[in-house]
Image (cartoon, helix red, strand yellow):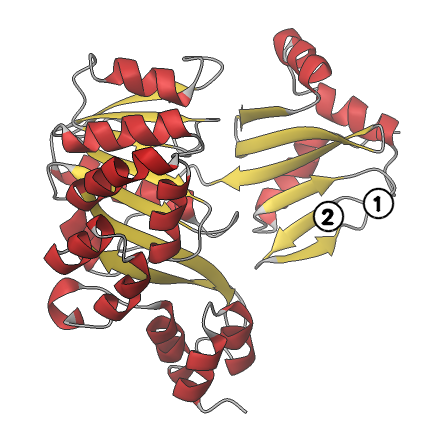
Amino acid sequence: MAIDIKKLLQSVVAHGASDLHLVSRSEPQIRIDGKLRAVNLPILTGEDIEEMTYALLTEKQKKAFEEELELDFALLLPNIGRFRANYYRTLGDIAAAFRIIPTKIPSLDDLDAPKIYKELIKREKGLILVTGPTGSGKSTTLAAMLNEINMTEHKHIITVEDPVEFIHKNNKCVFSHRETGTDTSSFAKALKYAMRQDPDIILIGEMRDKETIEAALTAAETGHLVFGTLHTNSAPGTINRIIDVFSGDEQGQIRAMISTSLVAVVSQILLPKHGGGRVAAPEIMVSNHAIANLIREDKVHQIYSQMQLGQGQSGMQTQTQVLERLVKNGVITKNIAIQFSNKPDELRTKINFR
């Protein structure tokens, strides 16, 4: 007998979990503080999961899933919460992953975010990228940035997402939330027509292809503040990823566009805290004249050195510096810091790890 999916999702929210996984031949699994834990329920069959998950779908969504074998959508359950859902198949059986989206949008102060974030969001134009692996809090950080703008500025903000996650209430700003597949056919097309919708700020849920990246850079160059995400783990890696999307004869022009439009790259990870909970560790690169020149001259590998200079004024910080500070303050253990570090040898020297 299948479990009531709504009651299960309600229980997931009550336990403070971030995700729910339904996979056949396993009991339901929830993720708390970054770790999966089995729920004390019977092992599920493919038929159980199909009965549970199809109860949440419209006829149109069922048809789309059966044709594409993949389905992304957002789900609002009154008095329970909002979720990002992904349905897929494994060994012929349906499976599902649900990500809990907080209905209360946090402020930058709630997140104890670096002070530089409040300066970055005051820019009138340019490109701000928040990057990191899946589950690193990119969407939450961006939502908090837009929430800060909503409390302080009068702007028209267009978000293009797949699916829409955080839904902002219009405070001082006006939000136009657009979902690919429902409100627009693609990120690239939404960005093309966004220019006719009088936006001040544009959020791109994921810069996943050449057309979207090119449109984002153009929007940032032409007087709009653009926020976007990529699945990269460092500022130099993010810049290289964007450039590598383009062919060799296009890369010179793209480097020039990035050098003039890029405002900042925040590359963050979420780490298990000593004693429970998780903490964000953001590497922050803020573009300046020197960094812009390095991008233009195809010397991206030298950016890391620039990030280590003049940090008091710029607000920049490397991941190693953040991890070192978290270890010294007792927030995370040395082992966790080394495990998640992009430059473990450099970090070992800083924290005397042997």
Query: Which amino acid does the dot numbered 2 rest on?
Result: Gln
Q: Where is residue 234 in the image (x, y as percent from the top left)?
A: 39, 58
The residue under the point 48% across, 70% down is: 341
Depth check, front residue: 39 or 300: 300
305 relative to 347 in the view: left or right = left
Q: Which mark is residue 284?
A: none
Graded by Cα atoms within 10 Å as few (under 14), some (14 to 19) or many (20 or more), the crowding at tag 2 reads many
221 relative to 96 in the view: left or right = left
Q: What element carries label 2?
A: strand
User: Disc 2 vs disc 1: Cβ atoms closer than 8 Å?
Assistant: yes
Q: Where is residue 177 in the image (x, y as percent from the top left)?
A: 34, 22
Is 83 above or below relative to 266? above
Q: Which residue has dot 1 on it?
A: 26
Quarter of the image that includes the C terminus: bottom right
Query: Which amino acid does the dot numbered 1 rest on?
Result: Ser
132 relative to 54 in the view: left or right = left
Depth check, front residue: 118 or 187: 187
Give how far apart the Cα atoms at labels 2 and 1 are. 8 Å
User: Is residue 83 something that shows in the picture?
Assistant: yes
Q: What element carries label 1?
A: loop
Depth check, front residue: 331 or 128: 128
Quadrant hosting residue 276:
bottom right
Q: Where is residue 145 in the image (x, y as percent from the top left)?
A: 26, 44
The residue under the point 33% across, 49% down is: 239
Q: Which residue has dot 2 on it?
A: 29
Is 345 above or below relative to 223? below
